[in-house]
Image: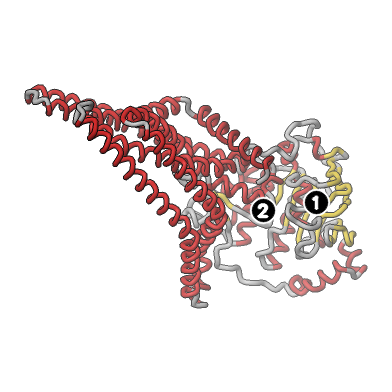
């Protein structure tokens, strides 16, 4: 890493710690009081135990009476009980606050994901950032919870070492030299350990991701058929064994350095213990030390070595967790891509939607998916956008909906650049139904309302128009029936056609002036698909309606058809005009036409056709 890179990394680590402290302070200021009280108590307790033990031994050696000795023992026990009770109370209080903060941050991560501009969620870099931020919260010992605990360990170990070495230096100044040697050796060992851990981190992530995917795949009921019919169990076992072998190969050098560290600490401990014993015996013989104090110095050597090792280990872990936590800092500090300030009021009537020289390239892609695109859509127009897979149809719709921002060019509403509107207001113009339908684990009614205020008259009108009334007529709980059976065992399993009726009702209830149907019927048979499109067309009167598909069930109902090819308008016109031209649209329609002419029907799948399970 360059000098400039190191400076930036150090700055970001500092900002990350500031971010964490600020979040903690905003969440619960009392946490810091208990946090520092815990540090003080954990430093005091071993010292108290050591010195009172020496004090009791000293009393015994002076042959004091049993009653006096018993009283002092009871006093020592009472003090220990108070200290331990206070430690337990503080520790449980801190843990309660830490768990609450962990849950709070977990919720904030997902709330932030719902607030982030959609372009910040697109591409491998965005997915990696979210994945790394989520990993910080995987469990209480990960980056977020771990760095809070480790910062306390660092401070406790450092202060303890300073206290212990100050006492030992009174016995012999050589302890200071040995301390420097021990610290230097541990720092060298930790340098190589951390270098190895940093190099191995991507390997661990890759290995863990494969393990997680394998576990997820084996738990998916849709895979169960293939596993049995294709005798995949032995194959899966081979994959698991290979992943485990890869894991052992990754951790083998890490374990080697741990053994080196353990042997080094043990060697230094033997040297320091030998020095403490030698110096103590010499001073006892010379009458310069009470025999009971021998226990203090002998114990402090072990305690110092243990605290020093804890300090080095906790510091190394702290810096690693700080580096991991940077992902959380970056995640919460992403700059908005879209406009959130209302420079223009949203028009009450949509007269035109225009794409003017629009170009868009996906992150990490080599070429634009939409290139210098121009199109004007008029009030109340019914427009079909068709083309082969990958032609750019869905991307074009996302640009119109405001989910993506053009690299170049403009999207205009009534001649006003879309960027002049606050994006939250702009979203209210559209009621889309996407091809990837995800259902939340709510009731049918809640799914239709989707958080909007309930209008009983409009709800029942939409409920009947969409066909959902017939769907739930036979259900004992009616529109209060839960959905997504994978999460709710008593939920309703929706077929493909039922799912489309539900999403249609949801879109209609929003009462937006622009309706968009983005290839949601790919899983339906041609006749059911045609029915869905006809219903949607019937409900789009007085609105702009766009039908996007690579199948052509919708095109004959539309006033205008755009055939898209490689992000450009290849053909444009009515169904009749394009059929007469006998171009790309004609050949696609003719290839698919037998489905519609012969009215071939396919049995509705009995498999689980709903997607979702989000809570």
In this orientation, which residue lies closer to the viewer: 29 or 49?
A: 49
Residue 478 point in image, percent of width and height: 52, 51
Can residue 93 be seen in the rendering of this structure? no
SS for dot 1: strand
Viewer-nearest residue: 578 or 93: 93
Q: Is residue 21 found left or right of 55 in the rendered image?
A: right
- Location of residue 184 in the rendering, given as x and y in whole percent from the top left corner: 47, 41
Name which quarter of the figure residue 379 lies in.
top right
Along the horizontal axis of the image, is 191 left or right of 380?
A: left
Q: Is residue 432 above or below residue 152?
A: below
Q: Nearer the viewer, residue 140 or 158?
A: 158
Q: Which one is earlier in the sequence, the residue at label 2 or at label 1?
A: 2
Question: Residue, x 60% and y 53% (percent of image)?
Answer: 438
Q: Which residue is mark 2?
A: 124
Residue depicted at 35% across the width and 47% down the height: 266
Percent x, y of residue 275: 30, 39
């Amino acid at each position: 890493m360059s000098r400039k890179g190191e400076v930036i990394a150090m700055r970001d680590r500092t900002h990350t710690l500031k971010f964490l402290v600020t979040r903690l302070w905003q969440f619960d200021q009392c946490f810091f009081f208990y946090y520092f009280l815990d540090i003080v108590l954990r430093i005091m307790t071993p010292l108290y135990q050591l010195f009172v033990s020496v004090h009791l031994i000293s009393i015994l050696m002076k042959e004091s009476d049993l009653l006096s000795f018993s009283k002092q023992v009871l006093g020592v026990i009472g003090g220990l009980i108070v200290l331990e009770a206070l430690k337990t109370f503080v520790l449980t209080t801190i843990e309660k606050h830490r768990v609450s903060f962990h849950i709070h941050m977990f919720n904030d991560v997902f709330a932030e994901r719902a607030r982030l501009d959609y372009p910040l969620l697109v591409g491998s870099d965005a997915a990696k950032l979210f994945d790394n931020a989520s990993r910080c919260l995987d469990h209480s010992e990960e980056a977020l919870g771990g760095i809070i605990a480790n910062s306390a360990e660092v401070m406790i170990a450092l202060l303890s070492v300073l206290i212990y070495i100050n006492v030992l230096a009174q016995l012999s100044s050589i302890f200071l030299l040995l301390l420097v040697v021990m610290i230097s050796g541990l720092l060298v060992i930790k340098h190589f350990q951390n270098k190895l851990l940093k190099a191995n981190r991507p390997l661990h992530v890759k290995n863990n991701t494969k393990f997680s995917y394998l576990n997820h795949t084996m738990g998916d009921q849709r895979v169960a058929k293939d596993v049995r019919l294709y005798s995949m169990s032995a194959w899966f076992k081979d994959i698991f064994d290979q992943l485990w072998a890869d894991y052992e190969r990754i951790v083998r050098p890490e374990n080697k350095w741990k053994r080196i560290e353990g042997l080094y600490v043990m060697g230094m401990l033997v040297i320091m213990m030998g020095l403490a014993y030698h110096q103590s015996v010499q001073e006892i013989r010379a009458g310069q030390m009470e025999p009971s104090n021998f226990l203090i110095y002998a114990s402090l050597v072990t305690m110092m070595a243990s605290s020093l090792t804890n300090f080095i280990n906790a510091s190394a872990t702290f810096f690693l967790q700080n580096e991991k936590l940077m992902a959380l800092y970056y995640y919460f500090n992403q700059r908005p891509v879209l406009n959130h300030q209302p420079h223009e009021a949203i028009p009450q009537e949509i007269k035109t939607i225009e794409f003017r020289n629009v170009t868009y390239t996906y992150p990490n892609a080599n070429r634009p998916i939409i290139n210098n695109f121009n199109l004007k859509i008029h009030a109340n127009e019914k427009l079909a956008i068709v083309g082969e897979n990958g032609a750019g149809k869905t991307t074009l719709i996302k640009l119109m909906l405001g989910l993506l921002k053009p690299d170049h060019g403009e999207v205009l509403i009534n001649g006003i650049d879309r960027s002049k509107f606050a994006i939250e207001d702009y979203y209210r113009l559209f009621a889309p139904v996407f091809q990837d339908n995800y259902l939340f684990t709510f009731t049918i009614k809640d799914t239709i309302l989707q958080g909007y205020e309930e209008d009983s008259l409009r709800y029942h009108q939409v409920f009947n128009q969409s066909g959902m009334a017939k769907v739930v007529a036979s259900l004992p709980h009616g529109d209060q029936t839960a959905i997504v059976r994978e999460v709710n065992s008593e939920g309703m399993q929706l077929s493909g056609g039922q799912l489309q009726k539900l999403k249609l009702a949801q879109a209609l209830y929003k009462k937006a002036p622009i309706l968009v149907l983005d290839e949601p019927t790919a899983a339906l048979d041609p006749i059911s698909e045609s029915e869905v499109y006809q219903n949607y067309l019937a409900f789009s009167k007085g609105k702009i309606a766009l039908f996007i598909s690579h199948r052509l069930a919708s095109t004959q109902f539309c006033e205008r058809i755009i055939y898209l090819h490689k992000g450009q308008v290849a053909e444009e016109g009515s169904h009749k005009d394009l059929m007469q031209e006998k171009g790309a649209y004609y050949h696609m329609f003719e290839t698919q036409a037998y489905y519609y002419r012969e009215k071939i029907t396919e049995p509705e799948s009995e498999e689980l056709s709903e997607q979702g399970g989000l809570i």
